[in-house]
Image: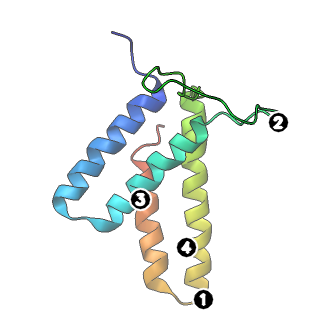
Amino acid sequence: MTEPTPAEAIKAELRRDLVAAMKRGAKAEMALLRQLVAALDNAEAVPLAETRPAAVHHLFGAGTAEAERRHLTLDDIEALLRWEIDARLEAAAEFARLGVDTRAEALTAEVELIRRYVGG
């Protein structure tokens, strides 16, 4: 059995936490965890080549339609999570400046949740 990649390990942790949030009915936490999993999935996507055939035919179930994925390093994942944190902190500051305190507080709570997944 192979050791999971850092992205696989963090996504597994996010999914476990998502299930726990679902059991508690924590809707805001569920939404954020889904966003983080999607952000990691998107970061693993390999850009399409500039030129590709008009149509590619695959046999159903042959596994030939599987797209290759990038293998994210721990540094890649931490950079992505830090970007998510920075974006929320910036938005929270702007909402606070505008007097929309409830939204600023919600974004700050999301930042604290994301920080659980960022090392050191």
In terms of secondary structure, where does tag 1 sit?
loop
Q: Which residue is mark 2?
A: 50
Q: Of 65 and 74, which appears nearest the observer?
A: 65
Kindly identify which numbered label has been placed on residue 32: 3
| Circle 1 Cα neighbour tier, 10 Å, few/some/many (<14 / 14–19 / ≥20) | few
In terms of secondary structure, where does tag 3 sit?
helix
Q: Which residue is mark 4?
A: 92
Q: Name which residue lies at 66% across and 33% down.
A: 46
Mark found first going from the N terminus, 2 or 3 = 3
Badge 2 vs badge 3, beta-carbon distance below 8 Å: no
Q: Mark 1 is on which residue type?
A: Leu
**Distance between the Cα atoms at labels 1 and 2?**
43 Å
Q: Of 12 and 96, which appears nearest the observer?
A: 12
Kindly identify which numbered label has been placed on residue 98: 1
**Distance between the Cα atoms at labels 1 and 4?**
10 Å
The vertical placement of 41 against 88, above or below, is above
Q: Residue 3 sits in which quadrant?
A: top left
